[in-house]
């Protein structure tokens, strides 16, 4: 059993969970569930990023203390992840005492191993509170941050602690050369390679007058204690969640995979590994930078009014349908759009008409022709053709070619379509009329139920509840997620008792608005 520690980005606790946060958590959850079904020892971390100017400002706007504010927001996130069946093992909040201790310990460790890595300098620049980053001139258009055009950039002049990132440039280049899979997909890797080529700059890692922060453990020469820059506090969450610096953290650290959005690749692929190297700690195995969910072709934002009500999106067809739609529609290595028209189309064509229909027809025929008991039958062409799809499914899911979850789903749906064609071509209802064709009928229905069992297993990471319903309807026992992919080819469904339940993907009663 391989250890598989995976993480998501921790979301800023300055507002409600939105569809972009959800997309990332669902994607990571699919990978976690997939790994568990491979038999890996999975540990799945998510959480919220609760410090920094952005959060402090949001709390001030509401007229509540930052702590009271983040307490409420954190609860909204955990509620939303529960609704979306996110199977995390640990939810970290950066205001937890253990996290604060861990960040201090990490900074002190860097300071004692590499005292020269921190130095004081006066600095001035444009700070974007939206990004919680200083912006270069080429990232500013019309006086605004390109990513947060509705926010005002803040001209900041102060004396801060700096981290000597430039010292790690050669180390990072060598690491990228030695571990080509460290950062993917390739588009993101190329961006960072270009950045490393261009040359890094040291970064300011403290803020003066920032009270909503972890105090930076080293005072400035003036005696002033500054607040730790929020990213220097947030990135270590992946480490502090393992219990660092308490003994035993090494059992979990390093993480095998960080799943993050493409906008924060540099923080995870440059700054975080440099911090770890400075602390002489092992680096995470991989960083996967997914793309963005766009609404009407735009990056949504609270302030620009482009948004989507998450509860409404879930209520439309249920949690699993939304999970399916997001990952089928928005490629996990690029951007993609969300629209209710596409959601309705995919729900009807992929889930209700294709998968739902295959299941209900097969179950009805086993009930009618075999008294609900699945007959025995040999492997047929359908099984052999499906093996090819299953191999591609795993290639898309296991990281060997990236985490192309949309391709994984595409493979399952291709095999569902093959199942429907097989039913049409073999006409079991016609075979049933001819007693001499009994053996053929047995073979056909056995093959379809076998295929449905495979679908339930392959879809379980994506649609855990629907996969379980399907599993139970075809007579599977126990929890489908306890099945192991390695056993799929030898799965024997003969003798299972099917039981038609409620329609897996019911059509809405009235036309959806
Ligand atoms: N707090 C930082 C992350 C710290 S990780 C140590 C942050 N928070 S965020 O709330 O702005 O974003 C959280 C995650 O959601 C990021 O990975 C980000 O890329 C992702 N997304 C935010 N909007 C998104 C979309 N529209 N689509 C997909 N993911 C997006 O950054």
Image (cartoon, rainbow, N blue to C red):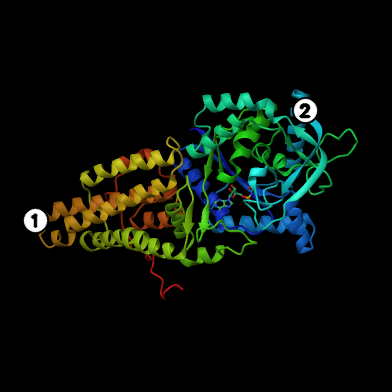
Front-most of 49 and 98? 49
Q: Secondary structure at mark 2?
A: helix
- Residue 157's place in the image compared with 165, above or below, is below
Q: Which mark is residue 436?
A: 1
- Whether residue 81 is visible to the viewer of this picture, yes or no, is yes
Residue name at image x 20 percent, y 52 percent: 444
User: Disc 1 versus disc 2: distance between alpha carbons?
Assistant: 83 Å
Residue name at image x 15 percent, y 60 percent: 432
- Tell me the residue that label 2 is attached to: 111
Q: In this view, which residue lies farthest toward the right? A: 222
Structural crowding at the residue carrying mark 1, measured as other residues with C-alpha within 10 Å and reported as few (<14), some (14–19) or many (≥20)? few
Give the image location of residue 282, x and y in percent: 62, 28
Q: Are marks 1 and 2 in contact (CB under 8 Å)?
A: no
- Residue 296's place in the image compared with 241, above or below, is below
- Residue 334's place in the image compared with 118, above or below, is below
Residue name at image x 14 percent, y 59 percent: 431
- Whether residue 280 is visible to the viewer of this picture, yes or no, is no
Q: Tag count in the figure?
A: 2
Q: Secondary structure at mark 1?
A: helix
Residue name at image x 77 percent, y 55 percent: 66
Instruction: Give the label, 1 or 2, closer to the camera.
Output: 2
């Amino acid at each position: 059993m391989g250890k598989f520690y995976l993480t998501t980005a921790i979301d800023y606790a300055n507002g409600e969970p939105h569809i972009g946060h959800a997309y990332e958590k669902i994607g990571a959850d699919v990978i976690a569930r997939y790994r568990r079904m491979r038999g890996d020892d999975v540990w799945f971390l998510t959480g919220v990023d609760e410090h920094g100017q952005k959060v402090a400002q949001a709390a001030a706007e509401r007229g509540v203390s930052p702590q009271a504010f983040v307490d409420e927001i954190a609860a909204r996130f955990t509620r939303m992840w529960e609704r979306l069946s996110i199977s995390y093992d640990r939810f970290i909040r950066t205001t937890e005492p253990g996290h604060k201790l861990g960040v201090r310990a990490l900074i002190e460790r860097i300071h004692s191993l590499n005292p020269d890595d921190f130095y004081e300098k006066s600095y001035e620049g444009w700070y974007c509170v939206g990004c919680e980053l200083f912006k270069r001139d080429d990232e500013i258009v019309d006086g605004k941050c390109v990513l947060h055009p509705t926010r005002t950039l803040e001209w900041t002049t102060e004396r801060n602690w700096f981290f000597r990132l430039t010292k790690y440039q050669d180390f990072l280049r060598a690491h990228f050369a030695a571990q080509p899979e460290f950062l993917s997909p390739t588009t993101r890797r190329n961006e960072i390679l270009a950045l490393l080529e261009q040359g890094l700059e040291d970064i300011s890692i403290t803020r003066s007058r920032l009270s909503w922060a972890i105090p930076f453990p080293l005072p400035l020469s003036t005696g002033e204690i500054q607040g730790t820059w929020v990213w220097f506090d947030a990135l270590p969450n992946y480490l502090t969640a393992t219990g660092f610096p308490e003994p035993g953290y090494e059992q979990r650290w390093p993480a095998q995979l960080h799943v993050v959005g493409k906008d924060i690749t540099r923080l995870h692929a440059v700054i975080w590994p440099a911090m770890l190297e400075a602390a002489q700690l092992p680096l995470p195995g991989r960083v996967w930078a997914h793309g963005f969910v766009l609404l009407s072709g735009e990056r949504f934002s609270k302030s620009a009014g482009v948004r989507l009500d998450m509860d409404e999106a879930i209520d439309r067809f249920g949690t699993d349908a939304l999970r399916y739609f997001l990952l089928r529609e928005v490629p996990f290595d690029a951007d993609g759009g969300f629209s209710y028209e596409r959601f309705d189309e995919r729900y009807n064509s992929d889930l209700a008409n294709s998968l739902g229909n295959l299941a209900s027809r097969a179950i009805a025929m086993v009930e009618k022709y075999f008294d609900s008991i699945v007959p025995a039958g040999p492997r047929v062409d359908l099984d052999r053709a499906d093996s090819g799809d299953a191999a591609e499914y795993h290639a898309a899911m296991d990281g060997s070619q990236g985490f192309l979850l949309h391709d994984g789903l595409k493979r399952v749906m291709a095999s569902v379509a093959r199942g429907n064609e097989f039913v049409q071509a073999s006409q079991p209802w016609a075979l049933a009329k001819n007693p001499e064709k009994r053996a053929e009928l047995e073979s056909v229905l056995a093959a379809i139920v076998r295929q449905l069992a495979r679908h339930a297993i392959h879809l379980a990471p994506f649609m855990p509840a629907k996969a379980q319903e399907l599993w139970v309807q075809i007579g599977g026992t126990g929890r489908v997620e306890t099945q192991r992919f390695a056993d799929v080819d030898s799965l024997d469904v003969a003798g299972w008792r099917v039981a038609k339940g409620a329609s897996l993907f019911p059509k809405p009663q009235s036309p959806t608005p």
